Image (cartoon, helix red, strand yellow):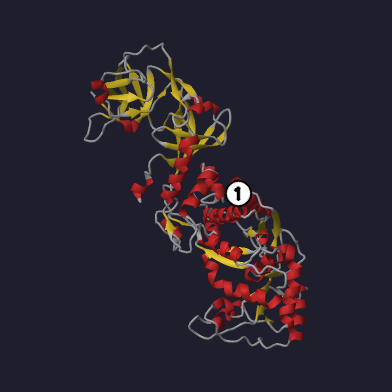
Amino acid sequence: MHFIERIIEEDIRNGFPIEKIKFRFPPEPNGYLHIGHVKAIYLNFELGKKYKSPVYLRFDDTNPIGESKKFIESIKKDILFLGFKWDIESYASDYFQKLYKWAIKLIQKNKAYIDDQSQKIIQFQRKTPFEIGIHSHYRNRSIDENLYLFEKMKNGFFKEGSCVLRAKIDMSSPNMNMRDPIMYRILQKKHHKTGNQWCIYPTYDWTHGQCDYIEQISHSLCSLEFENRRPLYNWYLNQIYDFKNKIIPKQIEFSRLNLSHTITSKRKIQYLIEKKIIPSWDDPRILTISGLRRKGYTSIALKNFVHKIGISKRNNIIDISLLEFWIREHLNKIAHRVMVVFHPIKLIIDNYSTNTTEWIEAENNPENSNFGKRKIPFSKFIYIEKDDFLEKQKKNFFRLSIGKEVRLKNAYIIKANSIIKNYKGEVKEIHCTYDPKSKSGKKEKVEKKGRIKSTLHWVSIKHSFPIEINLYNPLFLKKNPNTNFYKYINPKSKDQIIGYAEPSLKNAKKGDHFQFQRIGYFYVENSTINKIIFNKTVYIKNKWKKHL
C-alpha cells in the first residue's frame, strides 16, 4: 500500500463516504502522452478499480494555442492501449461559462481586479521569494470598474496582452503562486471545441480546482511540481463555494516519473520535431506512449514497470535499463523465436549434399510449449553473422575460427577448415565440414559436448529473404539531458539495415513480437507482400549501457 492509498484509507476511517470517492486524469491536449503519464494514468485508474470509483478523463483545454483534436484522439488511444477505460469524458471548456460567472463573484468580493500592465512588468513586480512584491497600480480599482472592464475583455474590446484578470491575494507571500496570480488572459484564437465563442481564457490554476469541484473529484492527484500550487488551489476553492453537502477536493502530490537519457517536455519534443531531429510525436526514440508502442512495448510491461518503481513523494531519475528489463521479462514469455542474420557472411558445408534441404524442427518459444514448433530449412549454403567468425582465434573468442567447432542453432556441429578472400583481403566464404551424428536433440559423446563452447544462429541462403530493420538506441548521450538537451543528441540513435530472415517470418503480421535469437526483441512495424519492416524493441543484453 503506497502513501496515497494510506491517505484515502485514513479519510474513510474518519468518515469519508467510500461511495463518493472519485478520481480524474486531466491531460492538456497539446501533445502526445509520454512515459511519465503512464504513472499518473496507472495510479488514478488502479485506484478507481480498487475503490470501485468512477474515473473522469478531463481534457484541460484552457489554451487554444497548440491544442487540437488530433492530440485528444491520441490521448484516448494511449489510455485504451494501457488497458484502461474512463467512465466520463469531459473538458475544462465545458465549464467556461460557469468559470466566467465565478470570476465575476471574485471581482464582486473585491478579490480580483483587471490589470493593464504588460506581462513583463507583472513578472518584475512579483520579485523573488526573498523580497516583497510590488502592488500593481491597478490593484485598487473599484469593483464596478473591474466588472465593467472584465465584461469588455470578454466581448473582445481589448487586444491580446493589453490586460488580464488577477486574483487579489498577497504580494508579500513567500509562495510566488500567491502573488496575485493571473486568472484570465486575452487570446484571439479559435478553440478546438468552443470555436470563436471566447476570446478570454482561464489559466490552469483558476480552472483546475474549480473543475475538480464541479465534477466532485474527491482526491485530485498531481505530480510533485504542483505541491507549491496547492495553497492557491485551496484559496480559490475557499473564495467561491458553500461546502455544505459538497465534497471538498483534496490535492495530493506524488513524484514524477523521470527516466535517464530522455526528455518528456512537450516543448522540447516539439523543438526536436521542428528541427527535423525526429519526424513526429510517435518516433520510437522518444518515450511517448505512441513511440513506445511503435517500438514494441506492451501495456503489461509498462504497467509492471510503474508498479515496480512504486508511488512515492521523492523525485529521482530511473535508469532506462529498468524499463528495458520489464519489456524483456514480458516479451520473453510471448515472443516467437526466429533466426535473422544482420551482417551475413557465406558459409559452405563441403560435406553436405548440394541438392539436399533438411527441414529441422524448432520450438517457437521454449518458455511455453503451447506456442508449438516450426520447420527451419537447412542446406549446404548458409549465412552466419560476420562477427561470429575470426580467421585466427583470440583469447575469450569462443565462436567460429579456423580449426574450431561450434554448433549451429537447432542443427549440427560444424568445423571451419578454410576461407576464400576477395580482392580487398576480406573473408568472402568460409568452408566447413559438419558432423552428421551431431544433430541437435540427439545424444552426443560427453567429450564432444565439452569441446563445443558456442552456438550460432544462421539462415539457409536460398530460403532466406530480406527484411528491413530499424535499430533504435537512446536519443541522448547524457543521463539527464534536460539542460541544453540539444547538445547531447546521439548521432547513432537510429540505424537502418537489411537483415536476412528464416522463411517462417514471411507470415509476420503488423503488431507481432519476435525474438531474433542471440540479438534481441523486434516488433513488426509494417507488413506487406513485398516488404516487412521491424523495429528493435530491446537487445537481449543491455549492449547500449557499455557505451554510456
Rendering coords of residue 502 (x, y %): 46, 25
Residue at the disc numbered 1: 78
- Name above or below for residue 291 compared with residue 265: above
Horizontal and vertical percent position of residue 104: 74, 77
- Residue at image position (62%, 79%) is 118
Q: Is residue 366 left or right of residue 89?
A: left
10 Å neighbourhood of mark 1: few (<14), some, or many (≥20)?
many
Secondary structure under the numbered disc 1 in the rendered image: helix
- Could you tell me which residue is drawn at 72 percent across and 81 percent down? 107
Q: Is residue 165 left or right of residue 127?
A: right
Asked whether 289 or 318 is in front, the reply is 318
Let me know if residue 161 appears in the view. no
**Snapshot quadrant of residue 176:** bottom right
- Residue 522 is situated, as x and y percent measured from the top left of the image, at 48, 37
Q: Which of the 4 image quadrants contains residue 211?
A: bottom right
Q: Is residue 68 left or right of residue 340?
A: right
Residue 47 position (above or below residue 137): above
- Residue 155, given in percent of the width and then of the height, sits at 78, 73
Q: Residue at left 48%, top 64%?
A: 313
